[in-house]
Image (cartoon, helix red, strand yellow):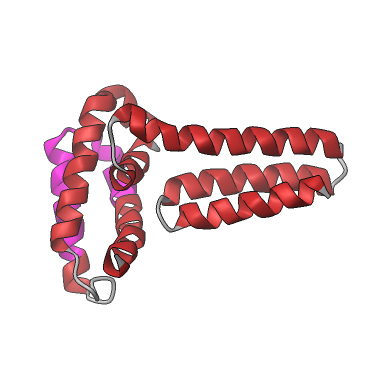
Amino acid sequence: MAAKLLEKLLKGEVSARRRKNVVQARSVAEMLETTLRRYQNRATEAAQVIEELIALAREIREATARGEQLGLSEDELAFYDALETNDSAMQILGDDTLRDIARELVDTVRNNVTIDWTLSENVRANLRRLVRRILRRHGYPPDKQEKATQTVLEQAEVLSQGWATA
């Protein structure tokens, strides 16, 4: 029963994260799914599942605190996470450069999205071009730029929906 309650709370947290930070939501959802699958396959005891779910809840809290430690707003952290998924970018560029890129991306996206930007291919293409230009200017690894651009645009789509309602 406690495991079901924790599962429900964490699924609610995943859906809330999905509206703000696509990368974090994916990560948390995968961990939650793995833990629950092991429990459903009887590979894990209920007490162990509860411990894992509590640890997952702690990780979620730490992820939120990480933004404060980095000095990033919630929106900036979402773009930072989108860029950080590439390990080589993290090693080459480091925290400071990724923070600068994230801040610049938030400004650029906010200034260039319109209400229906997800429907207009011209606006999407322009935003894709601007994102690529920012990544190139900051020396983001060329082999990973396309994937980062896709993730950033996906993140922009999620955040711009929130900006429109705010």
**Residue 79: percent from the left, percent from the top?**
31, 45
Q: Which residue is drawn at 27% across and 24% down?
A: 94
Magenta residue check for 126? yes
Looking at the rendering, in which quadrant would you find the C terminus? bottom left
User: Taking 164 as reference, is 9 left or right?
Assistant: right
Q: Residue at x 36, y 60 (%)?
A: 158
Say which quarter of the image contains residue 97.
top left
Towards the viewer: 42 or 4: 4
Identified at 61% across, 38% down, the residue is 57
Q: Give the range drawn in magenta.
A: 125-149
Residue 60 placed where, x, y %? 53, 39
Would you say residue 62 sits in the magenta stretch? no
| Residue 86 showing in the rendered view | no
Residue located at (19% from left, 56% from top): 109
Q: Please, is residue 67 above or below residue 79 in the view?
A: above
Q: Where is residue 29 in the image (x, y as percent from the top left)?
A: 58, 49
Q: Is residue 77 left or right of residue 35?
A: left
Residue 45: x and y in percent read 87, 37
Examine the image and state in which quarter residue 49 appears: top right
In the picture provided, is 42 more to the left or to the right than 24? Answer: right
- Relative to 9, residue 77 above or below: above
Instruction: Count every numbered label the image shows and give the total.
Output: 0
- Answer left or right for 32 relative to 60: right
Magenta stretch, main secondary structure, is helix
